[in-house]
Image: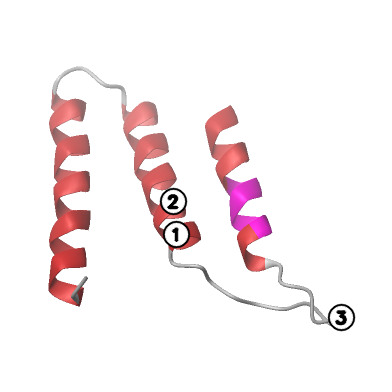
Amino acid sequence: MTPKDKALELYSKYEQLGRDFTRGVSMKEFAKESALLAVDEIIESNPIKFDEDDNCIASYWWKEVKQELEAL
């Protein structure tokens, strides 16, 4: 996928969320869905970070962020 294709894909996803918002979705739900979409994109991009013991921590951390968002 080219950067332009990805930009268009993300734009379309957020545009759809905006349409849903104007159809009666609360601001809280709109914010939550927007944040979840962003976290999913980060997880799918496979960010790699390591702790002091060379353990990969990024994916696990973002999945916890997603769980916290879903609990809102």
| Residue type, mark 2 in image | Asp
**Residue 28 on image: x %, y %:** 39, 29
The residue lying at 59 percent from left, 29 percent from top is 71
Tell which tag, 2 or 1, sits nearer the viewer: 1
Q: In which quarter of the image is residue 15?
A: top left
Q: Name the residue under label 3.
A: 53
- Above or below, 16 against 45 in this view is above
Q: Name the residue under label 2.
A: 40
In space, the residues marked 3 and 1 are separated at their CA atoms by 24 Å
Identify which residue, 45 or 27, lies in the foreground: 45
In space, the residues marked 2 and 3 are separated at their CA atoms by 26 Å
Residue numbers of the magenta segment: 60-65
Q: Name the outermost residue toward the top.
A: 24
Q: Name the residue under label 1.
A: 44
The residue lying at 62 percent from left, 39 percent from top is 68
- Per the picture, the main secondary structure of the magenta-coloured stretch is helix
Q: Confirm or deny contact between disc 2 and disc 1 (CB under 8 A).
A: yes
Q: Confirm or deny contact between disc 2 and disc 3 (CB under 8 A).
A: no
- Above or below, 38 against 28 in this view is below
Does residue 72 appear in this view? no
* Residue 62 part of the magenta-drawn span: yes
First-in-chain label (3 vs 1):
1
Q: Confirm or deny contact between disc 3 and disc 1 (CB under 8 A).
A: no
| Residue type, mark 1 in image | Glu
Residue 33 left/right relative to 4: right
